Image (spheres, helix red, strand yellow):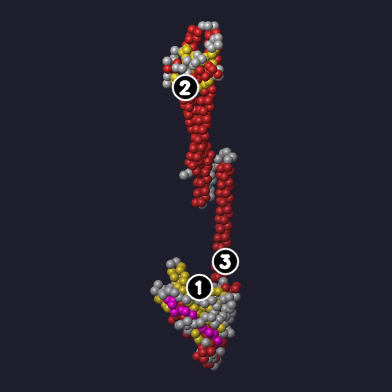
Amino acid sequence: MRTSTRLILILTVLVGLIMAAGGYYRLRQRETFLQRMLQNEMHAQALTLQIALENVFRAGRPQEAQLLIDSLSQNPKVFGVLVFDETGTAVLASSSMTAENRQQNEAARSVATTGIPTERTRRFNNEEVASLLTPLSLGAARRGAFELAQPTSFIKTELALARRDITVVTLLVFAAILLAVLAVMRYSLVQPIRALVRGAAALGRGDLNYRVPEPRQGSELAQLAREFNRMADSLAEQRQTAEREAERRLKLERELRDTERLAAVGRLAAGVAHEIGTPLNVIDARAEQLLERVDAPLPIRQRNLTIIRGQIERITRIVRQLLNLARPYQLHRTPTAAGPLVAGVVELLEADAARQQIELVIHKVENVLFDIDSELIHQVLLNVCQNGLHAMPDGGRLLIACAGPLLLRNGQRFASISVRDTGTGIAPEHLMHLFDPFFTTKDIGNGTGLGLAVSRRIVEEHGGWITATNNATRGAQFTLYLPVAKEAVAEAATVAEVPGTKELQPSAGIKQRKPREQAAQAPQPV
Ligand code: ADP
Protein backbone atom coordinates (compact mmCIF):
# COMPACT_ATOMS: atom_id res chain seq x y z
CA MET A 1 0.00 0.00 0.00
CA ARG A 2 1.31 3.46 -0.93
CA THR A 3 2.34 5.78 1.88
CA SER A 4 -0.16 8.41 0.74
CA THR A 5 -3.03 5.88 0.74
CA ARG A 6 -2.00 4.66 4.17
CA LEU A 7 -1.81 8.23 5.47
CA ILE A 8 -5.23 9.07 4.07
CA LEU A 9 -6.74 5.91 5.58
CA ILE A 10 -5.29 6.67 9.00
CA LEU A 11 -6.41 10.30 8.74
CA THR A 12 -9.90 9.25 7.64
CA VAL A 13 -10.32 6.91 10.57
CA LEU A 14 -8.88 9.41 13.07
CA VAL A 15 -10.81 12.43 11.80
CA GLY A 16 -13.97 10.30 11.53
CA LEU A 17 -13.62 9.14 15.13
CA ILE A 18 -12.91 12.64 16.44
CA MET A 19 -15.81 14.15 14.52
CA ALA A 20 -18.20 11.39 15.61
CA ALA A 21 -17.18 11.95 19.24
CA GLY A 22 -17.60 15.72 18.76
CA GLY A 23 -21.04 15.23 17.20
CA TYR A 24 -22.17 12.93 19.99
CA TYR A 25 -20.96 15.40 22.60
CA ARG A 26 -22.80 18.27 20.92
CA LEU A 27 -25.98 16.16 20.73
CA ARG A 28 -25.79 15.36 24.43
CA GLN A 29 -25.25 19.04 25.17
CA ARG A 30 -28.29 19.96 23.11
CA GLU A 31 -30.40 17.34 24.89
CA THR A 32 -29.35 18.64 28.31
CA PHE A 33 -30.06 22.18 27.19
CA LEU A 34 -33.54 21.27 25.93
CA GLN A 35 -34.39 19.38 29.11
CA ARG A 36 -33.22 22.29 31.22
CA MET A 37 -35.26 24.65 29.06
CA LEU A 38 -38.32 22.41 29.52
CA GLN A 39 -37.81 22.34 33.29
CA ASN A 40 -37.42 26.11 33.50
CA GLU A 41 -40.50 26.68 31.40
CA MET A 42 -42.44 24.14 33.48
CA HIS A 43 -41.39 25.79 36.73
CA ALA A 44 -42.29 29.24 35.43
CA GLN A 45 -45.70 28.12 34.25
CA ALA A 46 -46.30 26.16 37.48
CA LEU A 47 -45.44 29.23 39.55
CA THR A 48 -47.78 31.43 37.53
CA LEU A 49 -50.55 28.80 37.72
CA GLN A 50 -49.99 28.35 41.49
CA ILE A 51 -50.48 32.09 42.11
CA ALA A 52 -53.54 32.25 39.86
CA LEU A 53 -55.18 29.14 41.36
CA GLU A 54 -54.52 30.19 44.98
CA ASN A 55 -56.06 33.60 44.24
CA VAL A 56 -59.13 31.93 42.79
CA PHE A 57 -59.51 29.53 45.75
CA ARG A 58 -58.82 32.27 48.28
CA ALA A 59 -61.52 34.39 46.63
CA GLY A 60 -63.93 31.45 46.93
CA ARG A 61 -64.41 31.10 43.14
CA PRO A 62 -63.29 27.50 42.54
CA GLN A 63 -65.32 27.34 39.26
CA GLU A 64 -62.82 29.81 37.72
CA ALA A 65 -60.04 27.32 38.43
CA GLN A 66 -61.41 24.99 35.75
CA LEU A 67 -61.33 27.85 33.22
CA LEU A 68 -57.78 28.65 34.18
CA ILE A 69 -56.42 25.13 33.71
CA ASP A 70 -58.38 24.66 30.47
CA SER A 71 -57.04 27.86 28.98
CA LEU A 72 -53.50 26.92 30.05
CA SER A 73 -53.89 23.55 28.39
CA GLN A 74 -54.49 25.38 25.08
CA ASN A 75 -50.77 26.04 25.08
CA PRO A 76 -49.28 23.30 22.83
CA LYS A 77 -46.33 22.99 25.20
CA VAL A 78 -48.69 22.00 28.07
CA PHE A 79 -50.15 18.54 28.03
CA GLY A 80 -52.60 19.08 30.84
CA VAL A 81 -53.15 20.07 34.46
CA LEU A 82 -54.59 18.05 37.40
CA VAL A 83 -55.59 19.57 40.73
CA PHE A 84 -55.57 17.24 43.74
CA ASP A 85 -57.09 17.65 47.21
CA GLU A 86 -55.23 16.73 50.40
CA THR A 87 -56.07 13.00 49.89
CA GLY A 88 -54.44 12.93 46.48
CA THR A 89 -57.76 12.69 44.64
CA ALA A 90 -57.98 14.64 41.40
CA VAL A 91 -60.66 17.29 41.91
CA LEU A 92 -60.08 19.27 38.74
CA ALA A 93 -58.58 18.21 35.41
CA SER A 94 -57.99 19.95 32.13
CA SER A 95 -59.98 18.63 29.19
CA SER A 96 -56.94 16.80 27.75
CA MET A 97 -56.89 14.43 30.76
CA THR A 98 -58.83 11.14 30.69
CA ALA A 99 -60.53 9.46 33.65
CA GLU A 100 -57.59 7.19 33.99
CA ASN A 101 -55.31 10.22 34.56
CA ARG A 102 -57.54 11.43 37.32
CA GLN A 103 -57.08 8.38 39.55
CA GLN A 104 -55.94 8.92 43.12
CA ASN A 105 -52.36 9.81 43.22
CA GLU A 106 -50.07 8.92 46.12
CA ALA A 107 -47.35 11.32 44.94
CA ALA A 108 -49.83 14.20 44.88
CA ARG A 109 -50.96 13.38 48.42
CA SER A 110 -47.32 13.35 49.58
CA VAL A 111 -46.61 16.76 47.95
CA ALA A 112 -49.80 18.14 49.53
CA THR A 113 -48.66 16.87 52.93
CA THR A 114 -44.96 17.86 52.75
CA GLY A 115 -45.31 20.97 50.60
CA ILE A 116 -42.21 19.97 48.55
CA PRO A 117 -42.60 20.12 44.77
CA THR A 118 -41.67 16.93 42.88
CA GLU A 119 -40.64 16.41 39.31
CA ARG A 120 -41.18 13.15 37.46
CA THR A 121 -41.58 11.61 34.05
CA ARG A 122 -44.79 9.68 33.41
CA ARG A 123 -46.97 8.51 30.60
CA PHE A 124 -50.33 10.09 29.87
CA ASN A 125 -52.40 8.53 27.11
CA ASN A 126 -49.39 6.55 26.01
CA GLU A 127 -47.38 9.72 25.61
CA GLU A 128 -44.28 10.45 27.67
CA VAL A 129 -44.58 13.67 29.60
CA ALA A 130 -42.50 15.57 32.14
CA SER A 131 -44.63 16.64 35.09
CA LEU A 132 -44.20 18.91 38.09
CA LEU A 133 -46.23 18.36 41.24
CA THR A 134 -46.54 21.64 43.10
CA PRO A 135 -48.24 22.21 46.53
CA LEU A 136 -51.37 24.36 46.34
CA SER A 137 -53.39 26.19 48.97
CA LEU A 138 -57.07 25.35 48.39
CA GLY A 139 -58.24 28.09 50.75
CA ALA A 140 -58.83 28.15 54.57
CA ALA A 141 -56.70 25.33 56.03
CA ARG A 142 -56.90 22.99 53.07
CA ARG A 143 -53.69 22.09 51.27
CA GLY A 144 -53.70 20.20 48.02
CA ALA A 145 -51.40 20.00 44.97
CA PHE A 146 -51.54 20.39 41.26
CA GLU A 147 -49.64 18.59 38.49
CA LEU A 148 -48.52 20.41 35.38
CA ALA A 149 -47.60 17.98 32.58
CA GLN A 150 -45.62 18.97 29.55
CA PRO A 151 -45.03 16.69 26.52
CA THR A 152 -41.37 15.71 25.94
CA SER A 153 -42.01 14.84 22.28
CA PHE A 154 -40.80 18.26 21.16
CA ILE A 155 -37.42 17.50 22.79
CA LYS A 156 -37.21 14.33 20.70
CA THR A 157 -38.17 16.26 17.59
CA GLU A 158 -35.62 18.93 18.38
CA LEU A 159 -33.00 16.26 19.05
CA ALA A 160 -33.74 14.50 15.76
CA LEU A 161 -33.35 17.82 13.96
CA ALA A 162 -30.17 18.57 15.88
CA ARG A 163 -28.86 15.09 15.06
CA ARG A 164 -29.56 15.64 11.40
CA ASP A 165 -27.89 19.05 11.44
CA ILE A 166 -24.89 17.77 13.34
CA THR A 167 -24.55 14.77 11.00
CA VAL A 168 -24.73 16.97 7.91
CA VAL A 169 -22.26 19.49 9.32
CA THR A 170 -19.95 16.70 10.51
CA LEU A 171 -20.03 15.03 7.11
CA LEU A 172 -19.41 18.32 5.33
CA VAL A 173 -16.51 19.19 7.63
CA PHE A 174 -15.18 15.63 7.28
CA ALA A 175 -15.36 15.83 3.49
CA ALA A 176 -13.75 19.27 3.51
CA ILE A 177 -10.91 18.03 5.74
CA LEU A 178 -10.42 14.98 3.56
CA LEU A 179 -10.37 17.03 0.39
CA ALA A 180 -7.95 19.47 1.94
CA VAL A 181 -5.70 16.64 3.10
CA LEU A 182 -5.90 15.00 -0.32
CA ALA A 183 -5.07 18.24 -2.07
CA VAL A 184 -2.19 19.01 0.30
CA MET A 185 -0.87 15.46 0.00
CA ARG A 186 -1.13 15.44 -3.75
CA TYR A 187 0.45 18.78 -4.45
CA SER A 188 2.79 19.10 -1.49
CA LEU A 189 3.78 15.50 -0.85
CA VAL A 190 2.93 12.94 -3.51
CA GLN A 191 3.91 14.97 -6.58
CA PRO A 192 7.25 16.20 -5.19
CA ILE A 193 8.09 12.69 -3.94
CA ARG A 194 7.19 11.16 -7.33
CA ALA A 195 9.35 13.77 -9.01
CA LEU A 196 12.22 12.84 -6.67
CA VAL A 197 11.73 9.13 -7.41
CA ARG A 198 11.77 9.86 -11.16
CA GLY A 199 14.91 11.94 -10.64
CA ALA A 200 16.65 9.18 -8.67
CA ALA A 201 15.76 6.66 -11.40
CA ALA A 202 17.12 9.00 -14.07
CA LEU A 203 20.39 9.46 -12.15
CA GLY A 204 20.56 5.69 -11.71
CA ARG A 205 20.28 5.31 -15.51
CA GLY A 206 23.19 7.70 -15.84
CA ASP A 207 21.14 10.70 -17.03
CA LEU A 208 22.93 13.32 -14.98
CA ASN A 209 21.21 16.18 -16.80
CA TYR A 210 17.86 15.35 -15.21
CA ARG A 211 16.65 17.89 -12.64
CA VAL A 212 13.55 17.63 -10.45
CA PRO A 213 11.12 20.58 -10.35
CA GLU A 214 11.54 22.43 -7.05
CA PRO A 215 8.27 23.09 -5.17
CA ARG A 216 7.77 26.81 -4.48
CA GLN A 217 7.09 26.69 -0.75
CA GLY A 218 10.01 26.42 1.59
CA SER A 219 8.98 22.96 2.78
CA GLU A 220 11.40 20.15 3.60
CA LEU A 221 10.55 18.55 0.26
CA ALA A 222 11.49 21.74 -1.56
CA GLN A 223 14.76 21.66 0.36
CA LEU A 224 15.21 18.00 -0.55
CA ALA A 225 14.56 18.74 -4.24
CA ARG A 226 17.08 21.59 -4.11
CA GLU A 227 19.69 19.32 -2.50
CA PHE A 228 18.90 16.60 -5.03
CA ASN A 229 19.49 18.98 -7.93
CA ARG A 230 22.65 20.23 -6.28
CA MET A 231 23.84 16.62 -5.98
CA ALA A 232 23.00 16.02 -9.68
CA ASP A 233 24.97 19.18 -10.57
CA SER A 234 27.94 17.98 -8.62
CA LEU A 235 27.72 14.46 -10.12
CA ALA A 236 27.51 15.91 -13.62
CA GLU A 237 30.50 18.09 -12.88
CA GLN A 238 32.43 15.13 -11.49
CA ARG A 239 31.58 13.09 -14.55
CA GLN A 240 32.71 15.86 -16.84
CA THR A 241 35.93 16.13 -14.89
CA ALA A 242 36.36 12.34 -15.02
CA GLU A 243 35.67 12.33 -18.76
CA ARG A 244 38.11 15.17 -19.33
CA GLU A 245 40.65 13.34 -17.18
CA ALA A 246 40.06 10.06 -19.06
CA GLU A 247 40.44 11.86 -22.39
CA ARG A 248 43.60 13.52 -21.20
CA ARG A 249 44.94 10.18 -19.99
CA LEU A 250 43.95 8.50 -23.25
CA LYS A 251 45.72 11.20 -25.20
CA LEU A 252 48.78 10.83 -23.01
CA GLU A 253 48.67 7.06 -23.37
CA ARG A 254 48.34 7.39 -27.13
CA GLU A 255 51.29 9.76 -27.21
CA LEU A 256 53.22 7.45 -24.94
CA ARG A 257 52.37 4.47 -27.12
CA ASP A 258 53.47 6.39 -30.19
CA THR A 259 56.68 7.34 -28.44
CA GLU A 260 57.17 3.76 -27.28
CA ARG A 261 56.45 2.45 -30.74
CA LEU A 262 58.97 4.86 -32.20
CA ALA A 263 61.46 3.90 -29.50
CA ALA A 264 60.84 0.21 -30.22
CA VAL A 265 61.34 0.75 -33.93
CA GLY A 266 64.49 2.70 -33.08
CA ARG A 267 65.71 -0.09 -30.82
CA LEU A 268 64.88 -2.67 -33.46
CA ALA A 269 66.72 -0.69 -36.11
CA ALA A 270 69.67 -0.16 -33.78
CA GLY A 271 69.62 -3.86 -32.88
CA VAL A 272 69.51 -4.92 -36.52
CA ALA A 273 72.25 -2.44 -37.40
CA HIS A 274 74.34 -3.65 -34.49
CA GLU A 275 73.77 -7.36 -34.94
CA ILE A 276 74.23 -7.30 -38.69
CA GLY A 277 76.78 -4.50 -38.74
CA THR A 278 79.33 -6.47 -36.67
CA PRO A 279 79.47 -9.53 -38.96
CA LEU A 280 79.40 -7.26 -42.00
CA ASN A 281 82.47 -5.45 -40.67
CA VAL A 282 84.21 -8.76 -40.17
CA ILE A 283 83.25 -9.89 -43.67
CA ASP A 284 84.45 -6.60 -45.08
CA ALA A 285 87.79 -6.84 -43.30
CA ARG A 286 88.39 -10.47 -44.36
CA ALA A 287 87.33 -9.78 -47.95
CA GLU A 288 89.72 -6.82 -48.04
CA GLN A 289 92.54 -9.04 -46.80
CA LEU A 290 91.73 -11.54 -49.53
CA LEU A 291 91.73 -8.81 -52.14
CA GLU A 292 94.99 -7.27 -50.96
CA ARG A 293 96.78 -10.58 -50.66
CA VAL A 294 95.51 -12.68 -53.51
CA ASP A 295 98.77 -14.62 -53.37
CA ALA A 296 98.46 -15.37 -49.67
CA PRO A 297 99.02 -18.99 -48.65
CA LEU A 298 96.03 -21.29 -49.09
CA PRO A 299 95.38 -21.95 -45.35
CA ILE A 300 95.13 -18.18 -44.69
CA ARG A 301 92.76 -17.70 -47.60
CA GLN A 302 90.74 -20.71 -46.46
CA ARG A 303 90.59 -19.37 -42.92
CA ASN A 304 89.37 -15.96 -44.15
CA LEU A 305 86.72 -17.58 -46.31
CA THR A 306 85.61 -19.80 -43.39
CA ILE A 307 85.27 -16.70 -41.21
CA ILE A 308 83.31 -14.95 -43.96
CA ARG A 309 80.95 -17.95 -44.25
CA GLY A 310 80.54 -18.08 -40.47
CA GLN A 311 79.54 -14.42 -40.39
CA ILE A 312 77.15 -14.87 -43.31
CA GLU A 313 75.55 -17.76 -41.40
CA ARG A 314 75.22 -15.52 -38.40
CA ILE A 315 73.51 -12.83 -40.51
CA THR A 316 71.23 -15.48 -42.03
CA ARG A 317 70.32 -16.73 -38.54
CA ILE A 318 69.48 -13.21 -37.38
CA VAL A 319 67.42 -12.52 -40.48
CA ARG A 320 65.59 -15.86 -39.98
CA GLN A 321 64.83 -14.99 -36.38
CA LEU A 322 63.67 -11.53 -37.38
CA LEU A 323 61.38 -13.13 -39.93
CA ASN A 324 60.11 -15.50 -37.23
CA LEU A 325 59.22 -12.48 -35.23
CA ALA A 326 57.19 -10.94 -38.00
CA ARG A 327 55.82 -13.76 -40.11
CA PRO A 328 52.36 -15.23 -39.58
CA TYR A 329 52.54 -18.76 -38.18
CA GLN A 330 50.74 -21.75 -39.58
CA LEU A 331 50.38 -23.83 -36.44
CA HIS A 332 50.22 -27.62 -36.78
CA ARG A 333 48.59 -28.41 -33.51
CA THR A 334 48.56 -31.95 -32.22
CA PRO A 335 47.84 -33.34 -28.76
CA THR A 336 51.32 -33.37 -27.25
CA ALA A 337 52.18 -35.02 -23.97
CA ALA A 338 54.31 -32.86 -21.72
CA GLY A 339 56.60 -35.74 -20.76
CA PRO A 340 58.17 -36.52 -24.15
CA LEU A 341 58.25 -32.81 -25.04
CA VAL A 342 60.26 -31.92 -21.94
CA ALA A 343 62.41 -35.06 -22.30
CA GLY A 344 63.28 -34.05 -25.88
CA VAL A 345 64.46 -30.62 -24.71
CA VAL A 346 66.35 -31.98 -21.72
CA GLU A 347 68.20 -34.40 -23.96
CA LEU A 348 69.66 -31.50 -25.94
CA LEU A 349 70.63 -29.67 -22.75
CA GLU A 350 72.30 -32.53 -20.95
CA ALA A 351 75.75 -32.01 -22.38
CA ASP A 352 75.88 -28.30 -21.59
CA ALA A 353 74.30 -28.87 -18.16
CA ALA A 354 76.90 -31.46 -17.32
CA ARG A 355 79.69 -29.17 -18.43
CA GLN A 356 78.37 -26.37 -16.23
CA GLN A 357 77.71 -28.62 -13.21
CA ILE A 358 73.97 -28.01 -13.46
CA GLU A 359 71.43 -30.44 -12.09
CA LEU A 360 68.42 -30.98 -14.33
CA VAL A 361 65.17 -31.85 -12.57
CA ILE A 362 61.85 -32.69 -14.23
CA HIS A 363 58.83 -32.66 -11.98
CA LYS A 364 55.45 -34.29 -12.65
CA VAL A 365 55.01 -33.62 -16.31
CA GLU A 366 53.45 -36.94 -17.34
CA ASN A 367 49.79 -36.04 -16.78
CA VAL A 368 49.46 -33.03 -19.03
CA LEU A 369 48.46 -33.23 -22.67
CA PHE A 370 48.86 -29.96 -24.59
CA ASP A 371 47.21 -28.86 -27.79
CA ILE A 372 50.25 -27.29 -29.46
CA ASP A 373 52.57 -27.18 -32.43
CA SER A 374 55.14 -29.38 -30.71
CA GLU A 375 58.05 -28.27 -32.90
CA LEU A 376 57.56 -24.59 -32.18
CA ILE A 377 56.97 -25.08 -28.45
CA HIS A 378 60.03 -27.33 -28.37
CA GLN A 379 61.99 -24.39 -29.79
CA VAL A 380 60.53 -22.04 -27.14
CA LEU A 381 61.23 -24.40 -24.26
CA LEU A 382 64.75 -25.00 -25.48
CA ASN A 383 65.39 -21.27 -25.67
CA VAL A 384 64.04 -20.63 -22.17
CA CYS A 385 66.03 -23.55 -20.73
CA GLN A 386 69.21 -22.44 -22.49
CA ASN A 387 68.78 -18.97 -21.02
CA GLY A 388 68.46 -20.65 -17.61
CA LEU A 389 71.74 -22.51 -18.18
CA HIS A 390 73.44 -19.29 -19.31
CA ALA A 391 72.28 -17.62 -16.09
CA MET A 392 74.10 -20.29 -14.04
CA PRO A 393 77.76 -20.07 -15.12
CA ASP A 394 78.85 -21.50 -11.73
CA GLY A 395 76.43 -24.41 -11.71
CA GLY A 396 73.09 -24.80 -10.06
CA ARG A 397 69.79 -26.41 -10.65
CA LEU A 398 67.24 -26.20 -13.45
CA LEU A 399 63.74 -27.41 -12.62
CA ILE A 400 61.17 -28.05 -15.32
CA ALA A 401 57.67 -28.64 -13.97
CA CYS A 402 54.08 -28.78 -15.16
CA ALA A 403 50.93 -27.61 -13.43
CA GLY A 404 47.37 -28.01 -14.51
CA PRO A 405 45.12 -28.11 -16.34
CA LEU A 406 44.21 -25.26 -14.02
CA LEU A 407 43.21 -22.09 -15.74
CA LEU A 408 40.20 -21.26 -17.80
CA ARG A 409 40.40 -18.40 -20.28
CA ASN A 410 37.75 -17.69 -22.95
CA GLY A 411 36.41 -21.20 -22.44
CA GLN A 412 39.85 -22.77 -23.06
CA ARG A 413 41.76 -24.68 -20.39
CA PHE A 414 45.41 -23.91 -19.88
CA ALA A 415 48.26 -25.71 -18.18
CA SER A 416 51.71 -24.40 -17.55
CA ILE A 417 55.31 -25.46 -18.04
CA SER A 418 57.67 -23.59 -15.79
CA VAL A 419 61.45 -23.42 -16.00
CA ARG A 420 63.08 -22.36 -12.77
CA ASP A 421 66.81 -21.81 -12.29
CA THR A 422 69.04 -20.87 -9.42
CA GLY A 423 71.09 -18.43 -11.49
CA THR A 424 71.77 -14.72 -11.40
CA GLY A 425 68.12 -13.69 -11.64
CA ILE A 426 66.91 -10.73 -13.68
CA ALA A 427 67.76 -7.16 -12.75
CA PRO A 428 64.48 -5.37 -11.87
CA GLU A 429 65.10 -2.70 -14.52
CA HIS A 430 65.45 -5.43 -17.19
CA LEU A 431 62.23 -7.26 -16.32
CA MET A 432 60.03 -5.10 -18.54
CA HIS A 433 62.40 -5.28 -21.54
CA LEU A 434 63.07 -9.03 -21.52
CA PHE A 435 60.72 -9.74 -24.40
CA ASP A 436 61.81 -6.75 -26.51
CA PRO A 437 63.56 -7.72 -29.75
CA PHE A 438 67.36 -7.37 -29.47
CA PHE A 439 67.28 -6.94 -25.71
CA THR A 440 70.25 -8.87 -24.43
CA THR A 441 72.70 -8.65 -21.59
CA LYS A 442 75.02 -11.15 -23.21
CA ASP A 443 78.31 -10.36 -24.84
CA ILE A 444 78.49 -9.68 -28.56
CA GLY A 445 78.28 -12.91 -30.45
CA ASN A 446 76.72 -14.80 -27.51
CA GLY A 447 73.17 -13.54 -27.80
CA THR A 448 70.99 -11.82 -30.34
CA GLY A 449 68.27 -10.74 -27.91
CA LEU A 450 65.66 -12.27 -30.20
CA GLY A 451 65.08 -15.57 -28.38
CA LEU A 452 62.45 -14.41 -25.88
CA ALA A 453 60.76 -12.08 -28.36
CA VAL A 454 60.27 -14.98 -30.79
CA SER A 455 59.27 -17.28 -27.90
CA ARG A 456 56.58 -14.91 -26.76
CA ARG A 457 55.30 -14.53 -30.29
CA ILE A 458 55.00 -18.33 -30.67
CA VAL A 459 53.28 -18.80 -27.32
CA GLU A 460 50.81 -16.00 -28.08
CA GLU A 461 50.09 -17.56 -31.48
CA HIS A 462 48.84 -20.54 -29.45
CA GLY A 463 46.51 -18.25 -27.47
CA GLY A 464 48.78 -18.63 -24.44
CA TRP A 465 51.10 -16.31 -22.60
CA ILE A 466 54.52 -16.31 -20.97
CA THR A 467 55.67 -14.74 -17.71
CA ALA A 468 59.05 -14.05 -16.16
CA THR A 469 59.65 -13.55 -12.44
CA ASN A 470 62.53 -13.58 -10.05
CA ASN A 471 62.51 -16.30 -7.40
CA ALA A 472 62.24 -15.34 -3.76
CA THR A 473 65.64 -16.85 -3.04
CA ARG A 474 67.80 -17.12 -6.15
CA GLY A 475 67.38 -17.19 -9.90
CA ALA A 476 64.44 -16.66 -12.19
CA GLN A 477 61.39 -18.53 -13.36
CA PHE A 478 59.80 -18.47 -16.81
CA THR A 479 56.33 -19.95 -17.15
CA LEU A 480 54.60 -20.83 -20.42
CA TYR A 481 50.80 -21.08 -20.27
CA LEU A 482 49.62 -23.30 -23.09
CA PRO A 483 46.23 -24.69 -24.17
CA VAL A 484 45.35 -28.17 -23.03
CA ALA A 485 44.06 -30.81 -25.48
CA LYS A 486 40.38 -31.73 -25.04
CA GLU A 487 41.26 -35.35 -24.41
CA ALA A 488 43.72 -34.39 -21.69
CA VAL A 489 43.50 -36.29 -18.48
CA ALA A 490 43.15 -33.62 -15.84
CA GLU A 491 44.49 -33.58 -12.34
CA ALA A 492 48.08 -32.57 -12.77
CA ALA A 493 50.23 -31.92 -9.78
CA THR A 494 50.95 -28.43 -8.49
CA VAL A 495 54.52 -27.34 -8.31
CA ALA A 496 56.35 -27.38 -5.02
CA GLU A 497 57.36 -23.94 -3.90
CA VAL A 498 61.13 -23.64 -3.56
CA PRO A 499 63.45 -25.67 -5.72
CA GLY A 500 67.03 -26.15 -4.80
CA THR A 501 66.04 -27.69 -1.47
CA LYS A 502 65.84 -31.39 -0.91
CA GLU A 503 62.08 -31.22 -0.24
CA LEU A 504 61.33 -31.73 -3.85
CA GLN A 505 61.58 -35.46 -4.37
CA PRO A 506 61.29 -36.79 -7.90
CA SER A 507 58.10 -38.72 -8.46
CA ALA A 508 57.64 -41.69 -10.72
CA GLY A 509 58.69 -40.75 -14.19
CA ILE A 510 60.95 -37.96 -13.04
CA LYS A 511 64.11 -37.76 -14.93
CA GLN A 512 66.97 -36.60 -12.79
CA ARG A 513 70.66 -36.60 -13.46
CA LYS A 514 73.33 -35.76 -10.98
CA PRO A 515 75.92 -33.31 -12.36
CA ARG A 516 78.71 -35.74 -11.76
CA GLU A 517 76.97 -38.50 -13.72
CA GLN A 518 76.20 -36.03 -16.44
CA ALA A 519 79.77 -34.88 -16.50
CA ALA A 520 80.87 -38.45 -16.90
CA GLN A 521 78.56 -39.00 -19.84
CA ALA A 522 79.03 -35.63 -21.43
CA PRO A 523 81.58 -35.10 -24.17
CA GLN A 524 84.61 -33.30 -22.88
CA PRO A 525 84.89 -29.66 -23.84
CA VAL A 526 87.38 -29.11 -26.69
P1 ADP B 1 69.55 -13.69 -25.66
O1 ADP B 1 69.52 -14.99 -24.94
O2 ADP B 1 70.07 -13.81 -27.05
O3 ADP B 1 70.19 -12.59 -24.89
P2 ADP B 1 66.80 -13.67 -25.12
O4 ADP B 1 65.71 -12.89 -25.71
O5 ADP B 1 66.65 -15.13 -25.08
O6 ADP B 1 68.06 -13.25 -25.89
O7 ADP B 1 67.06 -13.15 -23.64
C1 ADP B 1 67.10 -11.79 -23.40
C2 ADP B 1 67.75 -11.49 -22.07
O8 ADP B 1 66.94 -11.95 -21.01
C3 ADP B 1 69.04 -12.18 -21.81
O9 ADP B 1 70.13 -11.49 -22.40
C4 ADP B 1 69.12 -12.13 -20.29
O10 ADP B 1 69.62 -10.88 -19.85
C5 ADP B 1 67.70 -12.24 -19.87
N1 ADP B 1 67.34 -13.58 -19.40
C6 ADP B 1 66.69 -14.52 -20.09
N2 ADP B 1 66.54 -15.63 -19.34
C7 ADP B 1 67.13 -15.39 -18.14
C8 ADP B 1 67.32 -16.14 -16.92
N3 ADP B 1 66.88 -17.41 -16.79
N4 ADP B 1 67.99 -15.57 -15.91
C9 ADP B 1 68.43 -14.28 -16.01
N5 ADP B 1 68.27 -13.52 -17.13
C10 ADP B 1 67.62 -14.07 -18.16
Label 3 beta carbon less than 8 Å to ligand 1? no
Tag 1: amino acid: Ile
Q: Earlier in the sequence, mark 2 or mark 1?
A: 2
Q: Is there any visible trace of residue 335 in the rendered image? A: yes
Between label 2 and label 1, give the one nearer the viewer. Answer: 2
The mark found on residue 122 in the picture is 2
The mark found on residue 342 in the picture is none
**Residue under the point 56% across and 89% down:** 293
Q: Is there any visible trace of residue 147 in the rendered image? A: no
Residue 391: quarter of image = bottom right
Residue 435 lies within the magenta run: no
Q: Toward the viewer: 378 or 370? A: 370
Which stretch appears magenta? 357-376
The mark found on residue 466 in the picture is 1
Q: Toward the viewer: 93 or 504? A: 93
- The residue pinned by badge 3 equals 259
Q: CA distance from mark 3 to mark 2?
A: 119 Å
